[in-house]
Amino acid sequence: MNYLKCILGLLLGLLSITVCAKIQTILPINTQDTSMVYGVNESNKLQFLYYGKRLNSFDNFSELHMVNKPDTNRTFQSPAIPTFGADGFMNEPMLRVTHADGGMSTDLVYVGHQVNNQDNNVSVMKVKLRDPNYPFFVTLKITAYLKENIVSQQTIIEHSEKGDIELQSFYSGYLALKSQAYHLTHFHGAWAGEMKLSEEKLTQGIKSIESKKGVRTTQTENSSFLLSLGQTSTEDTGEVIGGALAWSGNYKINFEVDEYKNLNLLAGMNPFASQYTLASNDIFETPALILSYSAQGQGKISRNFHSWARRYSLMHGDQERPIVLNSWEGAYFSFDQATITEMIDDAADLGVEMFVLDDGWFGNKYPRNSDKAGLGDWQVNQSKLPNGINFLAEHANKKGLQFGIWIEPEMVNQDSELAKNHPDWIVQRPGRKLLEWRNQLSLDLSNPDVQAYVYSVVDDLMQSVPNIAYIKWDANRHIENIGSNYLAKDKQSHFWIDYTKGLYSVYEKIRAKYPNLLMQACASGGGRLDFGSLAYHDEFWASDNTDPMARVSLQYATNLIYPAIATGSHISTSPNHQTKQPSSLKFRADVAMTGRLGMELLQDENRTFIKKALLTYKNIRKIIQFGDLYRMHTPIDGSGWTSLAYVGSEDAVMFLFSTRHHDRGIYPTVKLKGLDAKANYRITELNKGDKTCWVDQKVFSGEYLMNVGLNFDVRFAYDSLVLKLTKVN
Ligand code: GLA
């Protein structure tokens, strides 16, 4: 009999049978159009049940019909926080811990939960879990932003075990997805070529996007993605999940398709070389994984991220950004006081609103006349600027401009007073060769003394030049030669995380004292483009590549996730340091206007055109910086055009770029999106070139513009068009 039972049991285990699992407590989190659902099962385990289109009833989750895993007698279930060791989860775990007694397995059961509605748009659900064998606790925190259709996941880890525990893996968020196919869009690149988009079909195994570089963590691979479920998605069709990690240090995002075609998505701080010791009663909080779901393609994901960023993430997300002129491409390191005052005068005449003095203004014993010396010595260079920064800031103010300045306070040249005075502050492993990058080394921000110093760079500058209104904060290398003179020998692996936390603590102090200061996140261009850093910054420098054709693609990919209001986008000289290909001033201005418009120095250009363009931008910037972004043609749709529109409540601005030559007779039809179908719109051409577009001053209905569309004679590479659409009665 026993023998028969055994055979039967084995057969049942081997055959896939459908069973019912009871979910005792259902925990839904809703936004306007999406739902994320967790549930506590009969074994008191918190399960991840669903992320997708908004559901109105959750009752059916109480009985989950599931299939047994072949060759086990267990069902497919997805723990909310997959742990290593005790839970039967065989994929990459979200949490891996060595407990105080050496035990390597972790199990989590549900303790309780609470939901707190912060207001009528934001709600926070916290679910507390514990290990039945240890006083080890994890709180899963889910924040839902109703109108913006954003949900964020993060965890808080604490314990009161008898001794330290070691955290080995500590991801922030996890999704368990089931679809016929998965297509991942991610963004990779290099200096002056950030945010190159790749889309690929995921197959069994793990695809990871990650950084192990410590600084400039998002330059070579950005910590954001789009994941299409089933078919590939387009601007307006398909199921898509967008994600972005709010963390400016090493990160890892895993897309693991298992043997049954389930996709396990994990995102968080990179566990690589980062084992973290957590003392009893200390708290370890992971950064937020920001998620959005759309059943209507990628455009909606972008709009969700942008409105969320402006309202909840970006510094001063509700304030218009000034037009900046940055001195870098115009002067590099060679300037004196007269060069700068002339640039300011010129900028004022053109209608610029903020002058930013870039690299090269500091260092005396080791003057910063190239990138070889002076970094770290933040005293005004007396021979270049004998009357100091105050003189320049006042000069700018007198001319009606605000004044900004460049700093790179996390870094040091060996040829600097700072490096000579504080060799112990430099990231290095004694006995190893110092590896320079752009002739510079990194400072150890895990050290509180270095944090205090970095804060003092900003504070001293602000104290001595109170009318600094803008700081461009740069960071021009990765971290190598890992080693901290501050961290204890058994805590060296804390370096990556403590560096980023140290950086954030400096930002916090700066923001507490200087809440109105505008700050730009730059790390050789877009090396710190993530929602962790954007929480302290007003904008980012998207790339050192200011070639407008390159920017069409780069800003398209950037703005899939990050908003135009924060995208530093400058009109530059042409050809310039990045390209030999000349482009018209109109094309450069049109491209730059799709983001936060600024300029690098322009020589021998048509000043009348620039003046008018800057004035135009001032009139339309509300729409660009706060409007909803719709894309009609994209750089990846094969059409050879890129067209987009920012749509406000009363008006819209449309941009069209031809990115290659098209045969005679091949013209783009632009069918606008997001307009009011019932309204009429008067069209005004902006930044006019030699010819006037046929639609200028004509009136069309929203319905016509969106369904029939308009044809334009924009056929040759570097042709472009900008139109304003204004509602009329
Ligand atoms: C980096 C930045 C540039 C400029 C230089 C100055 O490369 O991305 O915009 O500020 O540093 O050295």
Image (cartoon, helix red, strand yellow):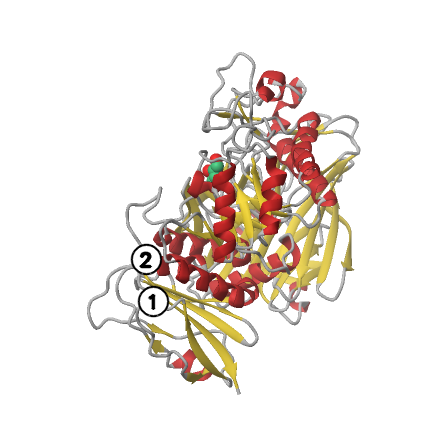
Say which element carries label 1: loop
Quick one: label 1, few (<14), some, or many (20+) residues within 10 Å? some
Say which element carries label 2: loop
x 34%, y 75%: residue: 693
Q: Pointers 1 and 2 in contact (CB under 8 A)?
A: yes
Disc 2 target residue: 584
In the picture as drawn, the residue positioned furthest to the bottom comes out as 729
Q: Is residue 489 left or right of residue 353?
A: right
Q: Which of marks 1 and 2 is nearer the N terminus?
A: 2
The reply to whether residue 470 is visible in this rendering is: no
Please give the label number shown on residue 47: none
Q: In this view, does 18 lie to the left or right of 130?
A: left
From the top left corner, tell me how far across and down residue 366 is, in percent: 53, 22
**Kind of residue sitting beneath label 1:** Gly
Please give the label number shown on residue 689: 1
Count of all numbered marks drawn on residues in the image: 2
x 53%, y 55%: residue: 323
From the top left corner, tell me how far across and down residue 159 is, in percent: 77, 35
**Kind of residue sitting beneath label 2:** Ser
Q: In this view, does 470 lie to the left or right of 134?
A: left
